[in-house]
């Protein structure tokens, strides 16, 4: 199944709102065990969240643009995918984002280094995006 970034983000919010409504009406929480989602769906959902929270157009994320804002958003998507998607290889992620596996590994290293150096710009962007990603996956890894 191929969803656009916007469709995946809407689906995420519909499911979250439905869960909240069921909890409110019944007083009971529920947990639906889903099969491991396809990597393309989860990457698309993370991309949708990051694009939405950082105000980056969806098409820009997959473009060849090297503008700093787009590049950082792309790097954040790659970092969050690594953190939240189990058994994700750089090659698989690169294929989804139309990048080489070495580009993915470089992005992982760059974001990890910027976090270690307490780079405020990247930390603020992660604070705006990661809570929604964690909510989508149910909890933090």
Image: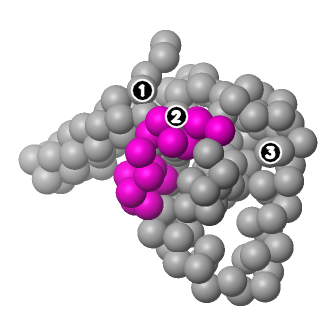
| Gap between marks 2 and 3 measured at Cα | 16 Å
Q: Nearer the viewer, residue 13 or 70?
A: 70
- Determine which of the numbered discs, if any, sits on residue 4 in the image: 1
For the question of whether residue 28 can be seen, the reply is yes
- Crowd around label 2: few <14 · some 14–19 · many ≥20 (10 Å): many
* Pointer 2 residue: 44
- Crowd around label 3: few <14 · some 14–19 · many ≥20 (10 Å): many
SS at mark 1 in the image: loop
* Pointer 3 residue: 104
- Crowd around label 1: few <14 · some 14–19 · many ≥20 (10 Å): some
SS at mark 2 in the image: helix
Q: Is residue 95 above or below residue 80?
A: above
Q: Earlier in the sequence, mark 3 or mark 1?
A: 1
- The x and y percentages for residue 95 are 73, 26
Report if the CB atoms under discs 3 and 1 are less than 8 Å apart: no
Which residue occupies the extreme top position in the image?
Answer: 1
SS at mark 3 in the image: helix
Q: Residue at x 68, y 83 (%)?
A: 119
Specify the color scheme: one colour
State whether the magenta stretch is mostly helix, strand or loop: helix
Of the residues tagged 2 and 3, which is closer to the observer? 3
Q: Earlier in the sequence, mark 2 or mark 3?
A: 2
| Gap between marks 2 and 1 measured at Cα | 7 Å
Q: Earlier in the sequence, mark 2 or mark 1?
A: 1
Q: Residue at x 75, y 34 (%)?
A: 99
Residue 116 is one of the magenta-drawn residues: no
Magenta residue span: 49-64
Which residue occupies the extreme left position in the image?
Answer: 25
- The x and y percentages for residue 36 are 61, 27
């Amino acid at each position: 199944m191929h969803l656009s970034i916007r469709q995946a983000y809407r689906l995420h919010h519909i499911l979250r709102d439905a869960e909240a409504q069921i909890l409110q009406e019944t007083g009971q929480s529920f947990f639906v065990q889903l099969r491991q989602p396809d990597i393309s769906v989860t990457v698309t959902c993370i991309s949708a969240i990051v694009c939405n929270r950082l105000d980056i157009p969806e098409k820009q994320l997959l473009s060849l643009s090297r503008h700093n804002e787009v590049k950082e958003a792309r790097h954040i998507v790659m970092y969050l995918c690594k953190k939240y998607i189990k058994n994700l290889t750089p090659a698989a992620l690169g294929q989804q984002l139309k990048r080489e596996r070495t580009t993915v590994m470089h992005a992982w290293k760059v974001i990890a280094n910027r976090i270690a150096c307490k780079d405020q710009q990247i930390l603020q962007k992660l604070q705006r995006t990661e809570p929604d990603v964690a909510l989508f996956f149910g909890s933090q890894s």
